[in-house]
Amino acid sequence: MGEGGLAAGKSTAAARHAWLCFEDEAGQGLRPPKGRTWGRRGQTPIVHVRGGGRGRVNIAGLVCYRPGDRSRLIYRIRIWRGRKGESKSLTWTDYRDLLVAAHQQLGGPIVLVWDNLSVHKMPPLQEFIDEHADWLTVFHFPTYSPDLNPAEGIWSMLKASLTNFAATDINHLTRTVRRCLKRIQYQASLIQGCLTQTGLIM
């Protein structure tokens, strides 16, 4: 979907008084994002991390906009602990459950814009979308267009909060990720700013 498709998505949302929601995924392992910090001259700061630890926090998030309403962030987390038979990535049921939760929390129809990730096109998820066409309309971003997705701004803020953060284990990391995301949820202006950065307008 190119810019014309984005325009169609916005027009559809306006016509149905629907929420325009952008979806994206992010993940974080036990090795934190590196960033600049302060230290004494000649003494490079060292952050000790559990580099050999297994585990990853995967997040699927929706940033949701509707004129006259407070901008919203809704997300779901899947924790991978490295156990046998455990899914390392988000499954189609995770996305289905995210959309159901969003519909319940937003209390209105949704126009969803997301990328062409293979799991988004899995037949069971497509069937779910078709079965709920009364409140769910889906458009796709063009290939390689993260600059158009305001959810990318959420992940940038999350990564900044985790810079040089040394988690003791996957549970510690998960609690910290949830706390960071909850802080963003309470600041609608930050979520709105992510839309502004893309150059898109409602």
Image (cartoon, grey):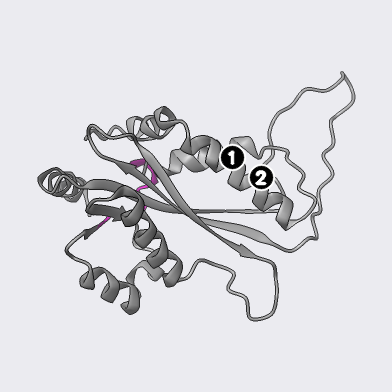
Q: Is residue 143 magenta?
A: yes
Picture coordinates of residue 37, whole percent (x, y)? 74, 26
Q: Is residue 142 left or right of residue 43?
A: left
Please give the range of residues in magenta.
139-148
- Residue nearer the viewer, 108 or 6: 108
- Residue nearer the viewer, 189 or 32: 189
Q: Is residue 4 left or right of residue 138?
A: left
Task: Name the residue that disc number 2 marks.
Answer: 176
Picture coordinates of residue 49, whole percent (x, y)? 81, 48
Task: Name the residue that disc number 1 marks.
Answer: 180
Residue 20 shows in the view: yes
Quadrant of res 152:
top left
- Residue type highlighted by circle 1: Cys
Query: Which residue is rendered at x = 22% and y = 34% of the image?
Result: 67
Quadrant of res 43:
top right
- Residue type highlighted by circle 2: Thr
Query: Which residue is rendered at x = 69% and y = 80% of the image?
Result: 84
Q: Are marks 2 and 1 in contact (CB under 8 Å)?
A: yes
* Secondary element at tag 2: helix
* Secondary element at tag 1: helix
How far, Cα to Cα, is label 2 from label 1? Answer: 6 Å
Q: Is residue 65 left or right of residue 30?
A: left
Picture coordinates of residue 195, whole percent (x, y)? 34, 35
